[in-house]
């Protein structure tokens, strides 16, 4: 299965949010800031950034699991498919 495009990711995230909040430019900004947080403070910095961005209390364990699963295109595509299935239920 091919790697999802940036537009596909934006569309999926907007579906999850329930309204058209993101666009490709905003996603680029989020990705740059996430990369900077990781480069400065490692996984802990990335997790802190994710908590601030999402405004939800997510444990390091959950974020670590998601992060490991998203390391390959296959896993990120599988994750997107799971989310799509859950949304259809």
Image: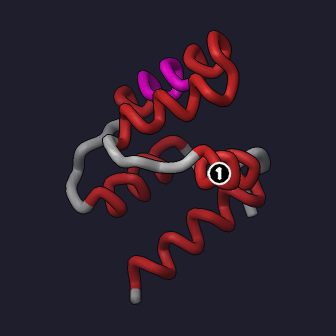
Q: Position of residue 71 (x, y in %)?
A: 76, 45
Percent position of residue 37, x then y: 56, 18
Question: Residue, x 62% and y 28% (percent of image)?
Answer: 44
In the image, 63 versus 72, the foreground residue is 63
Q: Is residue 85 above or below residue 17?
A: below
- Look at 43% across and 38% down and name the residue there: 51
Note whether 33 is above or below 20 in the view shown.
Answer: above
Quarter of the image with the N terminus is bottom right
> What is the secondary structure assignment of the residue under circle 1?
helix
Q: Position of residue 63 (x, y in %)?
A: 60, 47
11 is within the stretch colored magenta: no
Q: Residue at x 51, y 41 (%)?
A: 6
Q: Position of residue 34 (x, y in %)?
A: 53, 25
Q: Which colouring convention does the figure follow? A: secondary structure
Name the residue nearer the viewer: 1 or 78. 78
Picture residue at 54% right of the left edge, 49% below the top: 59
Whether residue 33 appears in magenta in the rendering, the answer is: yes
Q: Which residues are magenta?
A: 28-34
């Amino acid at each position: 299965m091919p790697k999802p495009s940036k537009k596909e990711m934006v569309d999926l995230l907007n579906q999850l949010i329930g309204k058209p909040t993101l666009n490709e430019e905003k996603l680029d900004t989020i990705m740059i800031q996430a990369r900077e947080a990781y480069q400065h403070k490692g996984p802990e910095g990335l997790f802190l950034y994710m908590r601030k961005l999402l405004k939800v209390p997510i444990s390091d364990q959950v974020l670590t699991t998601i992060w490991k699963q998203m390391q390959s295109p296959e896993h990120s595509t599988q994750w997107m498919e799971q989310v799509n299935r859950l949304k259809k239920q």
